[in-house]
Image (spheres, rainbow, N blue to C red):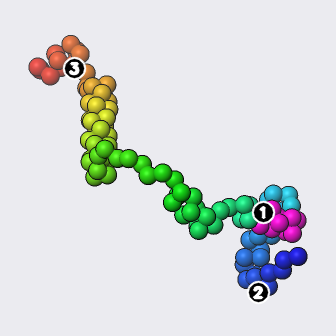
Amino acid sequence: MVQIRHVPDGVHRQLKAQAAEEGLSLSDYLRQQVEIIAKRPTMKEIVARLEALPPVPMTESPAELVRAGREERDRELDQALKSASKRHQPTSLSNAGRAHDRS
């Protein structure tokens, strides 16, 4: 059994409303949430898993990789802008409009 004391009224109301939205009693809702929390690895466990991974060999420095990624993104944006501006160029005046301009 787990008991939590001194839960602020506002937090209690919010949890009760969330439980109602899920169609659960407050007790069932909190049990479900506690199970979700219990399944999550702790920060220590995450760090241990990461430290156990083999190192990743890098042929380029991180700064070079970021620079290359930014350059690629800029090229793609430039291409998209050029393509968009071609589609939205104003059309030339019609013959009727040109005749009107001359008068």
Quarter residue 98 falls in: top left
Residue sitting nearer the eye, 96 or 26: 26
Q: Which mark is residue 11?
A: none
Q: Is residue 37 visible?
A: yes
Q: Which percent across, then down, holds residue 26?
A: 85, 68
Foreground label between 3 and 2: 2
Gap between marks 3 and 2 measured at Cα: 74 Å
Which mark is drawn over residue 35? Answer: 1
Local secondary structure at mark 3: loop
Q: Residue at x 74, y 65 (%)?
A: 38
Cα separation, mark 3 vs mark 1, equals 67 Å
Could you tell me if the residues under marks 1 and 2 are in contact, i.e. CB atoms within 8 Å? no
Q: Amino acid at mark 2?
A: His
* Above or below 15: residue 98: above
Residue type, label 3: Ser
Nearer the viewer's eye, disc 3 or disc 1? 1
For marks 3 and 1, the one nearer the N-term is: 1
Q: Is residue 27 magenta?
A: yes
Type of amino acid at the residue the image marks with label 1: Glu
Horizontal arrangement in the rendering, residue 91 relative to residue 33 (left or right) = left
Q: Are marks 3 and 2 in contact (CB under 8 Å)?
A: no
The alpha-carbon separation of the residues under discs 1 and 2 comes to 21 Å
User: x, y (%) of residue 11?
Assistant: 72, 76
Residue visible at 28% across and 42% down in the picture: 68
Residue found at the very far bottom of the displayed protein: 6
**Residue 77 covered by magenta stretch:** no
